[in-house]
Image (cartoon, rainbow, N blue to C red):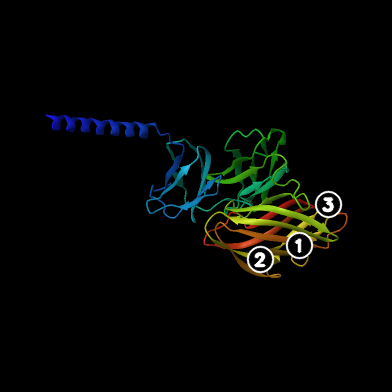
Amino acid sequence: MAKVFIRLFSGLSFLCICGLFCSCAKDEVETMGTIYGIVNDADNGEPIQDAHVSLSPYGKTINTGSDGSYEFPEMEPGQYTIQIAKFGYKTNTKRISVVAGEKASGDMVLQWGTSRIKLNIASLNFGGQSTSKTFTIRNISTSGTSVSWSVTKSSPASWLSVSPSSGSTAYGKESAVVVNIDRQRITKDETVILLVEAEGEALSVEVSVAKNGSDGGELDGGGSCGTITPYDTKLKTEFVQCTKIGGTMEFRFKITNVNDDVTLIFDSSQLKGYDDAGTVYDFTTSEFYISGDRIYFGGTTSKLFPKSVSMSCRVVLKGVPLDAGEITRYEVVATSSTPWKVLNPKMQFENVRW
């Protein structure tokens, strides 16, 4: 009888312990969500393999599998934009809301055909000071006709305005879109996605704004720098110092690769910049260095950017006139990258002051 009682007591204890653990498991709160989707051909419904999927913000990328599926796990709740591209298809973009503990549907279809529009950039970085920037929409269709387009915001973002928000661009021409920031409404770092839609195609521009006075304010050691549009959000680029001594101006910055290793091919013959006094700078009057090595004078050079490594870089401009107050724009061109493709072929520096 005692043995029966002991067994019964042990069994009840085991059930209580299991119930306690199950209760604890049920009480756990999911704080992250998942984006999951399948990409299909709009005409025949077949899955599309190896379509390139990019996520904004954060710049994550992945390719679809043989069944056309892709997944971004462990995503913080919030608003995201998925852009999907594949050669032979029109690029498509979709807004997605992620909720903690749930899977957000990222199912999309791609239409067969060539792109009709091209954007000159994929992101605009306003830093902590700039209030206005411009991107262009170019008509690259082969039909020889005009293309109608519209620009919308992925979220209300009352601090941002776009002009014009719609238009039509003639064949072979381009239209400028001005993005303005109301800095009185900026109290923290902000990011919003602009969707440029044109006749069955959708492209995106990521707009990032830093809190007023940060990311471009006064820097230790000299100078007030401007803003940077990087090659890619995965190649985080930040100013370090901007100085001018006599007729030589130098600005230092660092590039940190937060993605897998990538090699960029630079063409120094395409170095180009301007100052507010009207001076034009090219590869004969400016120099570009990475980790102390000068990018080959007037030619191409490859450079590896390892994962999670910060690379020190600098640009040196010579013959800067005394009456110049800032470098209004400077560009460094990367003609290609491998094994993954950067979003922007040009790294752009604007309103660089010393």
Label 3: few (<14), some (14–19) or many (≥20) C-alpha neighbours in 10 Å: some
Residue placed most toward the observer, 343 or 1: 1
Q: In this view, does 190 lie above or below 290?
A: above
Residue 316 is labelled as: 1
Asked whether, in this view, residue 196 is left or right of residue 272, the answer is: left
Q: Which of marks 2 and 3 is nearer the N terminus?
A: 2
The image position of residue 1, as x and y in percent, is 11, 29
Is residue 90 visible in this depiction of the protein?
no
Residue 191, quarter of picture? top right
Q: Which residue lies furthest to the right in this view?
A: 323
**Nearest to viewer (mark 2 / mark 3):** 3
Residue 325 is labelled as: 3
Q: Which of marks 1 and 2 is nearer the N terminus?
A: 2
Pointer 2 residue? 267
Label 1: few (<14), some (14–19) or many (≥20) C-alpha neighbours in 10 Å: some
**Nearest to viewer (mark 1 / mark 2):** 1
Residue placed most toward the observer, 25 or 92: 25
**The disc labelled 3 sits on which kind of residue?**
Gly
Residue plotted at (83% across, 52% down):
325
Residue plotted at (28% across, 30% down):
16
